[in-house]
Image: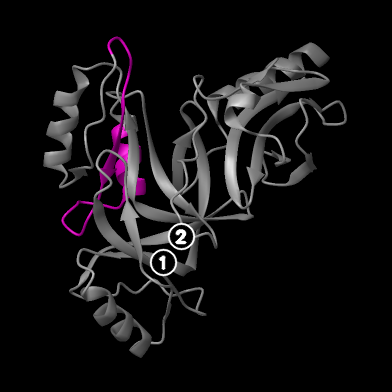
Amino acid sequence: MKKLVNLVAIIFCLLDIQAQCDYFFYGLSGQKLCLETYNKKRYITVDDAKDTLIVRQKLEQLGYSVSPFYEAIFAWGNVIEKYYALTETSNPNDTIAFNIEQISYEAPSFIFLGKYILILSHCFDVGLHSRADTTVLDSMTQIYGLNILGHPLFPENSPSQFVISCSQTSIENSLYMANLFYESNLFKHAEPIFLPGEVLEFSCPIRSTPDDICIYPNPANNIINIKKADELDLYNSSVEIFDMYGKCVYSQNYTDEINISVLRSGCYVLIIHRDNIIMALEKFVKF
């Protein structure tokens, strides 16, 4: 009977039956991760430095606090593509669009696993299977009013990664567009780029592909290990494990071996984080 229960838990985990939610993104090698809306903070961009002062004044007149504006600098040329800031309100139900002419993009924030505030930026990450996929990428970005922020060098026989930018002319925000690109099955991966809550700098997309990180063994019974821990610089970080209801069931400093023997059989999400930035995120089964 126990083997049957374990098998059901594994199938339940792999099929992501529990991931029925209004807002989500695809991570963990394609698994759907749920988000809750967080209306107190919003992300905005302007295209010209001279407009930052105008936008700040207009928002403060409307009762919003505004962080300093930062230069959104990306690789492949270090071009300043936009200026971004965070707005904040004390009203948790505030979903009114700003409708200020100088704001070129506006996005909400979300809560992940009931704890982590993720601020949606204007960009998302897309990985290609092969060089030929650049034609498809160019076509889709034109159709949906998006902008490709540079073309990195494309090593032979290796997939490549691109950052795509949304604006007021795009059909939707970067969360929606990343999901649309992923669900097209035309690309290796597509994930929105989030700002970690309270940290005003771009972080890596919250992603965990087989090339980046791997929990082994998976499924596991007593001990799990992280492949490529040295390359990912996971030391001096913290480990938390959440069950499928979003409850933290395990928390400690990172070690090479993570003892999960006290956990019940089932499906879990492991998060490794440091300085409010999520370093790694993966799903595993305990049997």
| Callout 2–callout 1 Cβ contact below 8 Å | yes
- x and y percent of residue 82 in the render? 26, 59
User: Is residue 1 visible in this depiction of the protein?
Assistant: no
Q: Quadrant of residue 220?
A: top right
Q: Earlier in the sequence, mark 2 or mark 1?
A: 1
Does 242 sit above or below residue 172?
above
What residue is rendered at 36% in x and 69% in y? 69
> What residue sits 76% from the left and 19% below the top?
5
Which residue is nearer to you in this view: 182 or 78? 78
Q: Is residue 166 magenta?
A: yes
Say above or below: 26 vs 85. above
Q: Quadrant of the C terminus?
A: top right
**Total number of numbered discs in the rendering:** 2
Instruction: Name the disc covering residue 196, or none.
Output: none
Give how far across and how far down residue 41 sits, in percent: 46, 68
* Magenta-span inclusion, residue 171: yes
Q: Which residue is mark 2?
A: 109
Q: How is the image coloured?
A: one colour
Q: Secondary structure at mark 2?
A: strand
> Badge 1 local density, few (<14 within 10 Å), some, or many (20+)?
many
Q: Which residues are magenta?
A: 156-181
Q: Quadrant of the N terminus?
A: top right
Q: Amino acid at mark 1?
A: Arg
Q: Which residue is mark 1?
A: 42
- The image shows residue 250 at horizontal and vertical percentages of 79, 40
- For the point 69% across and 23% down, the residue is 285
Is 31 displayed left or right of 193 in the figure?
Answer: right
